[in-house]
Amino acid sequence: MAARAGGADRYEEPSGEVLGRAAEAFGLLAAPARLHIVWLLAQGECDVSGLAERVGGALPAVSQHLTKLKLAGLVGSRREGRRQVYYVDDPDAVAVVRLMVGQLTEQEDAPVRRLHGTGA
């Protein structure tokens, strides 16, 4: 067990299996198109053609991304007439995506700080 400063809170070290599953999920989200798809689905349900239009990808490529995300349990789908509608199936993964993208967006919008004496 690892202890935080002060020893008040204790966390058990995650198992190799848990770390492996986390690495797989992060690996899936490492592709910008898949990350964009999860981001969009976090805003609301959408079909593959709507996602392809918003992501700027070809329909077959977006469909393949959705298949991988679905197999990983990050997104789900349901039939609505002739359309397949996709939605987020793992709200915790969405929380991680929102946190990371939100932090990076804030950093991008913040004024650039230059290091003194480096010319950078």
Image: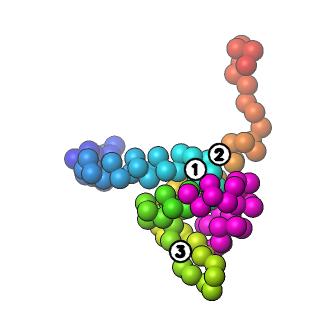
Q: In which quarter of the image is residue 108?
A: top right
Q: Residue 86 carries which label?
A: none
Q: Do the residues labelled 1 and 3 touch (CB within 8 Å)?
A: no
Residue farthest toward the bottom in the current orientation of the protein: 81
x and y percentages locating residue 117 in the rendered image: 71, 13
Gap between marks 2 and 3, in whole Å? 29 Å
x and y percentages locating residue 12 in the rendered image: 25, 51
Q: Quadrant of residue 94?
A: bottom right
Magenta stretch: give its range: 39-64
Residue 95 visible in rendering: no
Point 43% across, 62% down: residue: 71
* Secondary structure that dominates the magenta span: helix
Residue farthest toward the left in the current orientation of the protein: 1
Q: Is residue 30 a member of the stretch shown in magenta?
A: no
Can you say whether 116 is above or below 73 in the image?
above
User: Which residue is labeled 3 in the image?
Assistant: 77
User: Which residue is labeled 2 in the image?
Assistant: 104
**In the rendered view of the protein, which quadrant contains the C terminus?**
top right
Considering depth in this image, is 109 or 45 the residue closer to the camera? 45
Marked residue nearer the N-terminal end (2 or 3): 3
Q: Which amino acid, mark 3?
A: Ser
User: Which residue is labeled 1 in the image?
Assistant: 100
Q: Which amino acid, mark 1?
A: Met
Q: Are marks 1 and 2 in contact (CB under 8 Å)?
A: yes
Q: SS for tag 3?
A: strand
Gap between marks 1 and 2, in whole Å? 6 Å
Gap between marks 1 and 3, in whole Å? 25 Å
x and y percentages locating residue 61 in the rendered image: 62, 54
Residue 20 visible in rendering: yes
Q: Is residue 94 shown left or right of residue 20? A: right
Between disc 1 and disc 3, the foreground one is 3
Q: SS for tag 1?
A: helix
